[in-house]
Amino acid sequence: MNRGKWLVRFAFLVMAIFLVGCGTGSKNGSTGDTGDAAEAGGKKKLIVGTDATYAPMEYMDEKGNIVGIDIDIVKAVAEAAGVEVEFRNYGWDPLFPAVNNGEVDFAVSSITINEERKESFDFSDPYYIASQLILVPEDSDVESFQDLKDKRVTVQNGTTGHIVVQGLQGDTSSKILAAETMPLAIGEMINGNADASVGDNVVMIDYQKSNPKVKLKAVEDDSFEKEYYGLMVKKGNQEVLDILNEGIKKIKENGKLKEITGFDVE
Ligand code: ARG
């Protein structure tokens, strides 16, 4: 056999080992590639898409498992509703088409329920409250959202943080740098490529706490509205929506949701 063929074989072997190593460690280990709600050992199984770059809400642990507060909430919802769940990491932008084309049954990703998204998707009842927060270098003179009017600001593309900064500076402002993930957006600010970052408070605060050597200042502003997170399903998918709402209702009633998040969501 010539060298070329061996190389191809070797490449396949490496790929196979890599793919096995990438398993999410889900109990069922399903490799089914449709998002159809399948039956798993008598229980219905739902495929859940996420953007696991959003600690502490959804992120990868050292072993490559998808973990976080959102993940714990969905597991509790599933348990309460009597269904199985399997998580898949899609990234933020690809998550929306994945829900739309049925690759996943629903998405969890700290997704704020807003009017624009409600035109294209359906949302569960709210399960978490957040608001935007500004992160700046510790010695920055920024003290309010208005102070960002002429500053270079990083956001995660297509998020509510992006939308509020567009509201301040205009949709086409060249001073907005929209990154693929929130950590990348914050990294650009730390590197000096921007003056501030805007994103969900829980994630910004977590970043600041987990990186104490990077001297950052968090700036709150009363003009930021309350945002409610919901689980997102394909428009019209009442079956999955009912399952999720049943689970959410139960874990609100039995205190499990509060146990996970630390606060009540009406
Ligand atoms: N709550 C914000 C929004 O819905 C940001 C969510 C980003 N989530 C994520 N996993 N990257 O737009």
Image (cartoon, grey):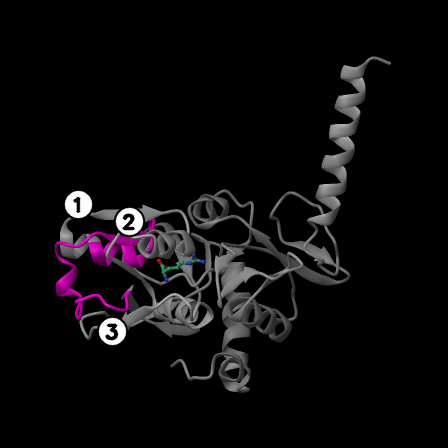
- Asked if labels 3 and 2 touch by Cβ distance under 8 angstroms, the answer is no
The quadrant holding residue 230 is bottom left
Q: Residue at x 21, y 73 (%)?
A: 221
Task: Write down the residue under mark 2.
Answer: 193
Instruction: Kindly indicate the quadrant of the structure image that contains residue 133.
Output: bottom left
Q: CA distance from mark 2 to mark 3?
A: 22 Å
Q: Residue flagged by tag 2: what amino acid is it?
A: Asn
Q: Which residue is labeled 1 in the image?
A: 173
Q: Nearer the viewer, residue 2 or 92?
A: 2
Give left or right: position of 127 versus 250: left
Q: Earlier in the sequence, mark 1 or mark 3?
A: 1
Secondary structure state at the residue bearing disc 2: loop
Q: Is mark 2 within 8 Å of ligand 1?
A: no
Q: Is residue 157 magenta?
A: yes
Residue that mark 3 sits on? 220
Who comes first in sequence, dot 2 or dot 3? 2
* Amino acid at the residue labelled 1: Ser
* In the displayed structure image, the side of residue 104 where residue 110 appears, left or right: left
- If you read the primary sequence from the N terminus, does the residue marked by circle 1 or circle 2 appear first? 1
Q: Residue sitting at 40 percent across and 61 percent down?
A: 111
Q: Amino acid at mark 3?
A: Glu
The residues colored magenta run 137-165
Query: Depth check: 47 or 220 in front?
Result: 220
Magenta highlight on residue 150: yes
From the image, which quarter does the N terminus lie in? Answer: top right
